[in-house]
Amino acid sequence: MKLPRPRSALAALAVLAVLLRLTVYWLAAQPFGPFADTMCQYDCGWYLRIGFSGYGADAEFANYGALPHWAFFPLFPLLLRLSFALLHATADLASQEVAGMVAANLLYVGFILTAFAYASRTRPTLDRRLLLLVLVVSPYGYFFSAVYTEGLFNLLLLAAVMMLAERRMLACATLTALLCATRPTGVLMLLPIGIERLRHLWRGRTRPDRMALLGETLLPLAIAPLGLSLFMAAQYISVGDGLAFSHVQILWDRHWIGPLTTLTHGMMQEDWANLLTPTAPPSQSYDAAWALLGLGLAGFLAWRRRWMEAWLLAAGILLPASTALHSLPRFVATSPFVLLTLAQAIARVQLPHGRLAIFILLAVLHLATLGLWFIGANSAY
Amino acid sequence: MPLSARARLILALILMIAQAAIVALALFAPRVSTAYRAYFLDHTAAEWHGEGG
């Protein structure tokens, strides 16, 4: 069966929506300084430096040398390097920021188109224009336009899930390998692939060609984690520690505590007031609330028997939450499964002007979080 | 050209063994300095006393 393709008019609408949103961002950024520089906050600088100078460059982070770079997975910096080459970015940071944003926004458009195709398969009655609005105006959506992995990761994730549903296992495994080279949570796809391959093995138990069956079963399982394995090999060769990507996270106060502890601790902090002070440390209660909201939605998806979406959302929250709560609002708010569920929920609203009111609220929240992002507030990250 | 059944199986086994070796090296045989081990692996050092990698 062929995958449903987004119609060209919808694709053009998606490009237009992204350009329009970038225009709004550009206008909003004027009081803060150059646009690309204002959009480049927190991890953006890390990605740009790795993309331009490689993992071995000095991280300019105390006397840790190049070590902190290993926390950042290689596929996105590699794509940035390609963008730098195509757009002739120089050592001048401004040119890198622009080239980085071009790459990020192309990936964002790719994600939107993949989300359309995914929605056609899993939610055929959902209006694509409504979905597009959700993808463009929902809070924290600026991560898709900034030099971050959001667009790339979510594009690959949805494509891998679609390939798995089509049982195109080599394509699924290759996409998962790329996913594993983008973020550590890419490994979460290994479980659904493993389950599907076991089912394949069981279905073929009476086949006479055992060698073919075994090869079909094992090859996708061998390809899928390659992105992480090769990154680990590179770290072992360079640093001597194949798990440096995890170990160096202590520099950002991330070390294994367990999600139950971090979430309980976060909820008990009652530090909501930190949200009102941009320079204050991030509010752990706020971060924990986003994590719980995401877990609640994962429970809802499981109830609707969307098992894979539920797994990818819940584990995608619990894995980072096992070290710290920071960034969880971003992970939850930009999850394609959260955005699709939100679009479905809005589609069910029948009140007169109800949808309009919701979209206005989302847009206000979007602009509020964007403003906090522009000033580098902890709560925007 | 599609791989034969035997080639698929051999490729899968080679990739799996290679990746198992990478994981084993990462888990059981890190080649790191004493300072790196104390700070990043064992957490016995509260401050970083090594040179950057």
Image (cartoon, coloured by chain):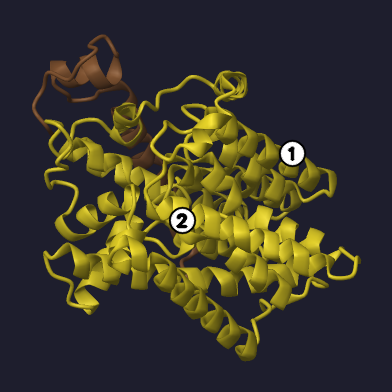
Q: Residue at x 59, y 46 (%)?
A: A332
Q: Disc 2 is attached to a residue of which chain?
A: A
Up/down of A348 relative to A291, above or below: below
**Residue A293 falls left or right of residue A261:** right
**Amino acid found under the numbered disc labelled 1:** Gly
| Chain in yellow (letter) | A
Chain letter behind tag 1? A
Q: Could you tell me residue B30's position as x and y percent?
A: 23, 25
Residue A208: image tag: none
- Left/right placement of residue A5 relative to residue A68 reads right
**Residue A296, numbered circle:** 1
Q: Secondary structure at mark 1?
A: helix
Mark 2, Cα crowd under 10 Å, few <14 / some 14-19 / many 20+, is: some
Tag 2 secondary structure: helix
Q: Nearer the viewer, residue A5 or A348?
A: A348
Q: Is residue A330 visible?
A: yes
Point out the frontmost of discs 2 and 1: 2
Where in the figure is residue A177, as x and y percent of width and height?
44, 54
Residue for badge 2: A371
Where is the C terminus of chain B found, in terms of image quarters?
A: top left
> Which quarter of the figure is the N terminus of chain B placed in?
bottom left
Q: Residue at x 45, y 77 (%)?
A: A23
- How would you rate the neighbour count of disc 1 (Cα within 10 Å): few for under 14, some for 14-19, many for 20 or more? some
Q: Which chain is brown?
A: B
Given residues B31 and A325, the one toward you in this image is: A325
